[in-house]
Amino acid sequence: MYSKLSLPTAEGKKKAVDQQFVPQDFLSIGINLLKSIQQLVRVEQQLQKELAQTNGWLRKKMLDNLTGKTARQRIEEEKLLEKQNEYHKISKISTLFEKEAQKKIASVGLRSSRGGQSSAQVSFKIKRS
């Protein structure tokens, strides 16, 4: 059995591609469909019990357990992760910059005002030859 897929190209246009499905593909689709139906049946049973216990109301905790994370929570976690990654990049760059600055200071004969520790204030000593 053949199927036509349309895939986006680098230019943004869609290109039609022929793909032949093998029996393994259909088996995989069938297994995933059965798993989904089984999960739906379990969730439906849990919801019916919950609705019977609470007279038609769903508890927020139960709803969150069934649906997973909300879109707002996912977005907040992604933003937090991006901020952490940015902070990590900045700290790496800062550390590299400090190491380079220390190398240059050592090669020119400058001395740090804090006894070798990196700092923003550097005292200059002129070497006498």
Image (spheres, rainbow, N blue to C red):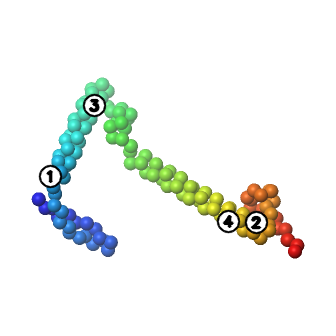
Q: Secondary structure at mark 1?
A: helix
User: Residue at coordinates 20% horizontally, 48% vertically from top-left?
Assistant: 28
Q: Mark 1 = which residue? A: 23
Decide: is 5 above or below 34.
below
Label 3 packing within 10 angstroms: few (<14), some (14-19), many (20+): some
Query: Residue 104 vs residue 87: left or right?
Result: right
* Mark toward the start of the polypeptide (3 vs 4): 3
Task: Give the spatial CA distance, label 3 vs label 4.
Answer: 61 Å
Residue depicted at x 43% and y 51%: 75
Distance of label 2 from label 3 (alpha carbons): 69 Å
Q: Is label 4 in contact with label 1 (beta carbons under 8 Å)?
A: no
Query: Quadrant of the rendered structure where residue 93 is?
Result: bottom right
Farthest top residue?
A: 53
Q: State the residue in front, 74 or 50.
A: 74
> Along the polypeptide, which appears first: circle 1 or circle 2?
1
**Residue corresponding to mark 4:** 100
Pointer 2: residues within 10 angstroms few (<14), some, or many (20+)?
few
Residue 9 position within the rendered picture, expressed as x and y whole percent measured from the top left: 29, 70
At label 2, which amino acid type do we have? Ala
Please tell me whether mark 2 or mark 3 is closer to you in this view.
2
Q: Among all residues in the image, which is located at the extreme left?
A: 1
Lower position in the chain sequence, tag 3 or tag 1? 1
Q: Which mark is residue 46?
A: 3
Left or right relative to 15: residue 118: right
**Dot label at residue 106:** 2
